[in-house]
């Protein structure tokens, strides 16, 4: 299998051991799952299916960010307890992903379950001189990690712009350097707080995933990723946090998924230009929606069109009309493109050709998680 690695900026051989450890950044559960989420988790689902087909055991961890500025703000706005909101949204998310046929994840740990691990990791960074206390918060000192920025390859102005955009607050006067990021912060009066030797507070965003990834999968992970918008600052900061303590490579292979747009702009909760999976499932059967998503290559940005779903319906009908039989060439037809950087559009086209020629395609469809 050849797979694009964000850090190496190239499609390279991916040849892991028998057990493949994978960490995919999960949702902050304060709103329903939209197509951008589905595209990410479907990519990791397809990757797992092909790796299992090759004889590997996959262990895919997908975290839940259940303490975070966005979740706490939405709970405050709605006048509900933040964990109640999280539980409600996670139930909706699990139902949507289940309908789309995603494999169950190896584990789905919550950030609030890892406070002890987070405190331990922050303590280790303080002891090794990679972190400092200031004004009741603890920050990571990026000047102590010379390769900071190697994953994204961004220059300093771009990193500062993205840090600002993602709540990194480069202008925080308590920081030594604008790109330093928070590891622990005091909680507001109506926010959850945990005791620590730096005062009562809550963790920063990036430290949650570092602690969970190490706890669930160890110091070095085979594959880590998520949406392309997480490359910086989130994944860049995760690398710094982990490698500054372990002195081991944190991730062997980074997989990032392109962004889904609607009406010319990236789908985002802040803009409100969202297509929710649950709404699509009211209009189309789940396998048609799955096929609509698979018709786009995981690495590219793309724009959702209603026609995508209609094309998914038509494709599903063509495949179902294909004959059934023992001599199913569909598997080989799908395996080749999947091994070429998860080329799902190529896999769909290969099955289309077989179906049109009157050959069975059920086995190939099954490898793509499509039940006919």
Image (cartoon, grey):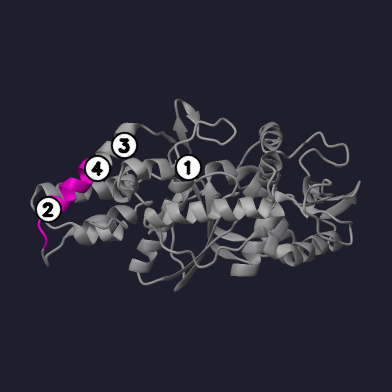
Residue 366: image location, x then y, percent: 27, 60
Direction front: furthest residue: 79
Indicate which disc residue 313 carries: 4
> Is 351 on the left-hand or right-hand side of 166?
left
Which quadrant: the N terminus? bottom left
Dot 3 crowding, Cα within 10 Å, few <14, some 14–19, many 20+? some
CA gap between label 4 and label 1 equals 19 Å
> Which is more N-terminal, label 1 or label 4?
1
Question: Which residue carries the number 2 mark?
Answer: 322
Question: Which residue carries the number 3 mark?
Answer: 308
User: In the rendered structure, which segment of residues is drawn in magenta?
Assistant: 314-324
Which quadrant of the structure image shows residue 365?
bottom left
> Which is more N-terminal, label 2 or label 3?
3
CA gap between label 3 and label 2 equals 21 Å
Secondary structure found at label 2: loop
Residue 95: image location, x then y, percent: 44, 55
> Which is more N-terminal, label 3 or label 1?
1
Q: Nearer the viewer, mark 3 or mark 4?
A: 4
């Amino acid at each position: 299998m050849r797979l694009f690695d964000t850090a190496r900026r190239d499609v390279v051989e991916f040849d892991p051991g028998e057990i493949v450890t994978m960490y995919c950044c999960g949702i902050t559960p304060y709103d329903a799952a939209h197509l951008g989420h589905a595209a990410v988790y479907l990519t990791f689902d397809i990757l797992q299916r092909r790796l299992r087909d090759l004889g590997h055991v996959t262990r895919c961890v997908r975290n839940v960010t259940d303490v975070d500025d966005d979740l706490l703000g939405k709970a405050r706005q709605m006048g509900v307890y933040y964990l109640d909101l999280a539980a409600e949204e996670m139930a909706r998310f699990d139902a949507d992903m289940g309908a789309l046929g995603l494999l169950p994840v190896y584990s789905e740990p919550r950030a609030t379950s890892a406070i002890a691990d987070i405190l331990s990791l922050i303590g280790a960074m303080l002891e090794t001189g990679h972190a400092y206390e200031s004004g009741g918060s603890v920050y990571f000192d990026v000047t102590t990690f010379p390769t900071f920025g190697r994953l994204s390859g961004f220059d300093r102005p771009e990193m500062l712009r993205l840090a600002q955009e993602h709540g990194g607050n480069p202008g925080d006067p308590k920081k030594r350097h604008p790109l330093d990021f928070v590891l622990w912060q005091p909680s507001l009066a109506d926010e959850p707080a945990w005791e620590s030797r730096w005062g009562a507070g809550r963790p920063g965003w990036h430290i949650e995933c570092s602690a969970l990834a190490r706890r669930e999968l160890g110091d070095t992970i085979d594959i880590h990723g998520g949406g392309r918008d997480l490359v910086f600052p989130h994944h860049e900061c995760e690398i710094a946090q982990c490698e500054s303590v372990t002195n081991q490579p944190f991730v062997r292979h980074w997989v990032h998924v392109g962004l889904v747009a609607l009406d010319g702009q990236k789908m985002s909760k802040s803009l409100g230009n969202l297509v929710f999976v649950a709404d699509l499932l009211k209009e189309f059967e789940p396998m048609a929606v799955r096929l609509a998503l698979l018709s786009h290559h995981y690495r590219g940005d793309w724009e959702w069109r209603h026609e995508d779903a209609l094309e998914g319906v038509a494709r599903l009908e063509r495949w179902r009309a294909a004959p059934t039989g023992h001599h199913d060439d569909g598997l080989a037809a799908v395996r080749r493109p999947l091994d070429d950087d998860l080329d799902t559009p190529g896999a769909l086209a290969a099955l289309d050709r077989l179906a049109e020629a009157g050959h069975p395609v059920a086995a190939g469809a099954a490898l793509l998680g499509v039940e006919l």
